[in-house]
Structure formats: structure tokens, C-alpha cells
């Protein structure tokens, strides 16, 4: 495993070969393993260990990066020489700042522990035992199971010639299960740094229940329905808006927040922040330049509060005609490694959820619904109108009809066309936020939501 001492030793080698004004070393990698199953049997096991180092050099406003996955002296020297050769032929970047100083890095002990030995040491036999339980439960219910059980341990470090050093290590375990019946299916997925928090059998039980309960799906007319979106469905929808919460997206006028920061855009019950130190979050406490990530309140009571900034983006915004329209501007530690065209984005999203005592379980949301649709997950989501955040996609793996406070039948799936802005203005109830995983977006801490007038436009054939 890449540790702090190894990172420092590699940087000393980089410095020995470098002639640039400034130099930065980014290191990352680790071990990962995956057990894949389908048709109620394991059909693939893979495991690998790999690392890379990426060197960025700076000459008088010119910068470039070169990367290698070989750590011998000759390979490091060639990577340094390549980074310097490329940097020398670049046009000078007037917006390029000096490298971040040591005072901008996270302090020691600044983030929760996200490395668990039991996850790092998880064996293929242990993953197989988890899959065995899933498959046995599938067979018992006359279902066919497919999915993955994966685990990993990884580390990343940034070191630069201004004395900045930042290091983070973490583990991850993930189970994803699809249970297939003749004309229906059910799905569950969960991811955590701590494998002890992953319960394959419980995920399998829920996926199997959804597959059996949605058998013989009915077809109802498309239209606007009250929907109850489970957390995975919420995550895959709202994930489409957070790359717009970066200062560079606003400067480029490609953000749906242009002319909307400081204004009420969503319902009063919507408050969202970015917080990499939240106990249900994962990831490093620093950004692509090694700058400490700050907790940023993005939306407060439906009002778009502010966006996040990399160092250079904050400086550009301060000189922009847009400055008076965007609220507080300062580096927040959300930049991607340089050079890049994206700037920054919040990647540790947390929904505040309902007020104290106001949270409703999914069962309580169903019980309070006269007629509606319960949605397990969504897929194949695409953006139709970037400024109004109009999305289209389909339901999948457990869509149910709710009548008189009860789930009464499985439904054929729907295509939807829905504005995220309108959806987050029509949230009638929320559960306590949980760590959720989907397929179309990164993991977040989100609640289930009951939403009125969700727009289904077409019934699918499955």
C-alpha cells in the first residue's frame, strides 16, 4: 500500500530530476477485487493492485502534467522530462496561480477514519460466502440472481515544492443485486467503507421481495402521479444538477444557476450541503491541488446559497462582471487536478432531510397516498433542457401501484420527462437521509421523497 513515507520518498526523486520553477506530485492507487455472479452462480473473480504517479511542472505561467505507473528511477525521470517538455511549449496561462502552500492542506486528523482492516482484508472466499447466501435465497424464491460483491483499499497523496503534503487512505465494499423473475425484477445496492455495514442477505431479501411483488405487472395510463422515490431513485435524478454548482460552470454560463444564485428555486424543505466529513460520506478531505475541503451550504430552505470554488476559479470570479450575482466567493477546496477545463464540483452531497420529528418512512409515505407510484430506481437518464434541468429516463426493477395507502400491484415501467426544479418544489415528505448508491451518479446522503405531479409520459413494454 502507498503510505506517507513512500509518497515523500517518491517526491524527493521527482525533485531530484526536475528543473521547473514549481513541481507537484499526485499519487494514487491500491488493491481492488470483485466477484461477479449471474444465473445463480459465480462466473468471474478479478483482483488487481495498481498505482500511478502524475507530475505537474510549472515554468513562468506554463504548466503540464505527465503520468506513469512505473516507479523505477528511469520511469520517474522520463515522466518529469515529459511534463517539463510539454509545459515549455504551452501558451502562458494568465489565470494560473502559484502552487498551493502547506497552510492550505488539511490538518492531521481532519477527517473521519475511512480505512477498515476488515474491508481491506476481505478474501475471495468471504465474498463467495456472501454470494452463496444471495443465491440460496434466490433459489428458495424461484428467482435468478445476478450482481457483484466488490472490495477495495486505496490511498492518494499530493506533495508539492511549496511544502504542501496531503494524504488519505480508505476502503470500500459494495454489493449490487438484481433478482429476476419471469416478468418482473427487483434490485438493491449498497456501498460503505466498512464491510461490516454491508448486509448482502438483507439486500437480497429486499430485492427478492420486490421481484415477487411486482410479478404480473399491470399497465396504467401515463400522466402526472404522486410518486414515492426510494433514495437510489432520488440520487440518480438530483446527481444531474451538482456539476452546475461549480464556479467555473457559472463563469462559462453553462450552469442552470446562472441568474438564480440567492433566489428561491426549490421548496422550503430543501436544504443541501457539501460535507466530506459527514459520517456517512467517503473520500479525501482535500481537492486536486491538496487544498482542504470546506463544508459548503449549497441550498438553504430552497434558496440557492452559493457554489464551490477552486483557487483559480475564485480569482477569476472576483474579476468577472458576474461577481455581484453569485454571493460569497472564495476557494472552498473543491477543485479537480490541474490542468483541467471543468474547474470544480461538490462531490460529497448531503441532503439535510426533514425537520426534527418530520421524517416519514417509505411505508408511511405509501400509507398516506391515495393513488400513486412507488419507484425503486431509475436508469438511462439523460438531460433534455440543461437550464430547466428537464430530464428523461425510465423506471426499473420494482415499480409499484399504490392505492388507498397500500401497494396493490407491480406496474409496467414508465418513461418520464421531469424538471428537477419542479420536482424539488413539489416534495411533500422525506425520510431520514441515508447513504445511497445508484448507477447514474456518485454516492450521496439522500432521503426517500414523496413528490406530487411527477410526469410519466410513456409506458414501456417491460
Image: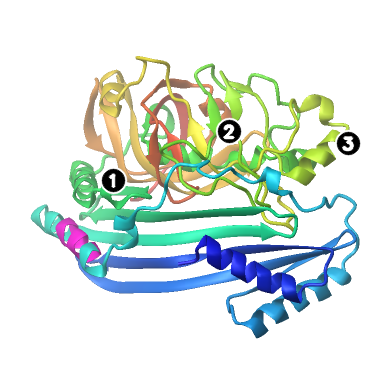
Task: Give above or below for 90 relative to 76.
Answer: above
Count of numbered marks:
3
- Badges 2 and 3: C-beta atoms under 8 Å apart? no
Disc 3: which residue: 319
Compare marks 2 and 1 and give the one earlier in the sequence.
Answer: 1
Between disc 2 and disc 3, the foreground one is 2
Q: Is residue 293 visible?
A: yes
The percent position of residue 48, horizontal first and vertical second, equals: 41, 73
Task: Return the mark for residue 295.
Answer: 2
The percent position of residue 404, horizontal first and vertical second, equals: 24, 20
Compare marks 2 and 3 and give the one earlier in the sequence.
Answer: 2
Assign a secondary structure to mark 2.
loop
Q: Is residue 413 left or right of residue 304?
A: left
Disc 1: which residue: 197
Task: Return the mark for residue 266.
Answer: none
Q: CA distance from mark 2 to mark 1?
A: 25 Å
Q: What residue is drawn where x is 68% and y is 40%?
A: 246
Secondary structure character of the magenta stretch overall: helix
The percent position of residue 219, horizontal first and vertical second, equals: 31, 39
Does the magenta run of residues contain 156? no
**Residues shaded magenta:** 127-134
Quarter where residue 353 is shown: top left
The percent position of residue 199, horizontal first and vertical second, equals: 23, 48
Q: Is residue 353 left or right of residue 139?
A: right
Quarter where residue 341 is shown: bottom right
Compare marks 3 and 1 and give the one earlier in the sequence.
Answer: 1
Q: Residues within 10 Å of mark 3 (few under 14, many from 20)?
A: few
Q: Is residue 141 left or right of residue 252?
A: left
- Badges 3 and 1: C-beta atoms under 8 Å apart? no
The residue nearer to you, when weighing 336 against 455, is 336
Amino acid at each position: 500500500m502507498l503510505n506517507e513515507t513512500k509518497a515523500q520518498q517518491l517526491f524527493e526523486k521527482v525533485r531530484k530530476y526536475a528543473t521547473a520553477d514549481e513541481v507537484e506530485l499526485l499519487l494514487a492507487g491500491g488493491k481492488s477485487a470483485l466477484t461477479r455472479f449471474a444465473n445463480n452462480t459465480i462466473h468471474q473473480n478479478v483482483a488487481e493492485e495498481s498505482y500511478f504517479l502524475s507530475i505537474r511542472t510549472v515554468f513562468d505561467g506554463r504548466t503540464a502534467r505527465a503520468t506513469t505507473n512505473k516507479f523505477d528511477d528511469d520511469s520517474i525521470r522520463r515522466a518529469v522530462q515529459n511534463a517539463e517538455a510539454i509545459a515549455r511549449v504551452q501558451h502562458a496561462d494568465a489565470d494560473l496561480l502559484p502552487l498551493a502552500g502547506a497552510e492550505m492542506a488539511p490538518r492531521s486528523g481532519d477527517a473521519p477514519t475511512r480505512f477498515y482492516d476488515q474491508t481491506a482484508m476481505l478474501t475471495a472466499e468471504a465474498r463467495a460466502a456472501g454470494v452463496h447466501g444471495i443465491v440460496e435465497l434466490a433459489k428458495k424464491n424461484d428467482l435468478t440472481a445476478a450482481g457483484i460483491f466488490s472490495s477495495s483499499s486505496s490511498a492518494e497523496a499530493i506533495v508539492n515544492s511549496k511544502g504542501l503534503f496531503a494524504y488519505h487512505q480508505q476502503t470500500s465494499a459494495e454489493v449490487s443485486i438484481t433478482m429476476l423473475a419471469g416478468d418482473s425484477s427487483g434490485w438493491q445496492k449498497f456501498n460503505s467503507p466498512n464491510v461490516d455495514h454491508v448486509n448482502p442477505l438483507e439486500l437480497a431479501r429486499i430485492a427478492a421481495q420486490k421481484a415477487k411483488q411486482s410479478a404480473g405487472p399491470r399497465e396504467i395510463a401515463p400522466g402526472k402521479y404522486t410518486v414515492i422515490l426510494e433514495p437510489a431513485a432520488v440520487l440518480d435524478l438530483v446527481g444531474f444538477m451538482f456539476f452546475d454548482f461549480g464556479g467555473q460552470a457559472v463563469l462559462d454560463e453553462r450552469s442552470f444557476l446562472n441568474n438564480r444564485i440567492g433566489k428561491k428555486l426549490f421548496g422550503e424543505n430543501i436544504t443541501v450541503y457539501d460535507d466530506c466529513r459527514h459520517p456517512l460520506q467517503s473520500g479525501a478531505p482535500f481537492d486536486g491541488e491538496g487544498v482542504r475541503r470546506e463544508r459548503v451550504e449549497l441550498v438553504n430552505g430552497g434558496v440557492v446559497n452559493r457554489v464551490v470554488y477552486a483557487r483559480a476559479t475564485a480569482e477569476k470570479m472576483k474579476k468577472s462582471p458576474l461577481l455581484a450575482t453569485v454571493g460569497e466567493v472564495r476557494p472552498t477546496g473543491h477543485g479537480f487536478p490541474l490542468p483541467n477545463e471543468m474547474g470544480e464540483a461538490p462531490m460529497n452531497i448531503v441532503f439535510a432531510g426533514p425537520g426534527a420529528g418530520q421524517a416519514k418512512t417509505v411505508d408511511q409515505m405509501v400509507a398516506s397516498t391515495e393513488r400513486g407510484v412507488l419507484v425503486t430506481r431509475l436508469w438511462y437518464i439523460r438531460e433534455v433542457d440543461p437550464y430547466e434541468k428537464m430530464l428523461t429516463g425510465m423506471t426499473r426493477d420494482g415499480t409499484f401501484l399504490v392505492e388507498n395507502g397500500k401497494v396493490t400491484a407491480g406496474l409496467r415501467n414508465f418513461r418520464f420527462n421531469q424538471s428537477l426544479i419542479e420536482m424539488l418544489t413539489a416534495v411533500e415528505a422525506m425520510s431520514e437521509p441515508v447513504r445511497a448508491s445508484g448507477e447514474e451518479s456518485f454516492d450521496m446522503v439522500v432521503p426517500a421523497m414523496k413528490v406530487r405531479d411527477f410526469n410519466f409520459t410513456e409506458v414501456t413494454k417491460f
